[in-house]
Amino acid sequence: MGKRIISLIMSALCILLLTACGNNSSTNEPYTTNDPKAVYKMVSDVREDMREAHTGMLIFPDRDDYYSDVYAKEEIYGFSTSHQIYNVKTYEKDEYESEVARLKEVANNGEKVYYTEDLFSLPAIVAAYSYQNRYEYALLDLDNLQIIYVCNTFLDDWSFIEESYRPNNYDDAEELEKFDYSIY
């Protein structure tokens, strides 16, 4: 009798685990927000548990007052979470230069960010690009002293963000996959 109960419990746990891991549809409704404090909290929460979104959000600022014009969408899939986040921050000249210097030094396990002028409409510092359907980068708009921070993990719909902030060829999967990079 005891072995049968244990077997039933193990079977139930396996079914629950397979349902959670194998589910390609969201188990929760997508959460979206334009609240800077909520987006900063979301970024901070992901930083504390890299497994969740498969990114460290290292490109994003680590000060809540650096979040202003923001958008975030989060979808939960079993034990994984997809994120689409952007933050457009306008700086004073000295702050801009300091933040660009910080971004150029971002690294993870010895892997440094990648600087490019070819993959986007603006120069960019890239932590992840097309690597396992993950994107994390900062666009550098010197003319307006703005930095646009972007993260898109596991979601193919780029419509949440202005076209000028998207990768060149964002709508051509073959082109996007020609180059991939990640510090994660």
Image (spheres, rainbow, N blue to C red):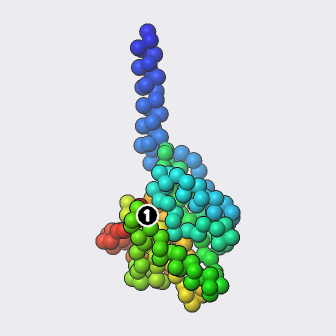
Q: In the displayed image of the protein, which residue is found farthest to the top?
A: 1
Rendering quarter of residue 134: bottom left
Name the residue at 51% across, 69% down.
59
Horizontally, is 43 left or right of 154 in the view? right
Q: In which quarter of the image is the C terminus?
A: bottom left
Q: Which residue is drawn at 41% across and 20% down?
A: 7
Answer yes or no: is residue 182 visible: no
Q: Measured from the top left, where is residue 79 in percent x and y?
A: 49, 45
- Name above or below for residue 52 compared with residue 96: above
Left or right: residue 42 compared with residue 123: right
Query: Does residue 72 show up?
Result: yes
Vertical relation: 151 (above or below) 5: below
Dot 1 falls on a residue whose secondary structure is strand
Q: Where is residue 183 in the image (x, y as percent from the top left)?
A: 40, 65
How many numbered marks, from 0 up? 1
Residue located at (39% from left, 65% from top):
110
Given residues 96 and 28, the one toward you in this image is 96
Front one among 99 and 144: 99
User: Residue 82's x, y, as percent?
Assistant: 50, 56
Q: Is residue 174 above or below residue 4?
A: below
Estimate the x, y position of residue 116 in percent, counting from the top left.
41, 80
In the picture, the quarter occupied by the N terminus is top left
Image point (60%, 66%), residue name: 62
Residue at image mark 1: 108
Instruction: Name which residue type carries label 1.
Output: Asn
Q: How crowded is mark 1: few (under 14 residues within 10 Å), some or many (20 or more)?
A: some
Front-most of residues 71 and 6: 6
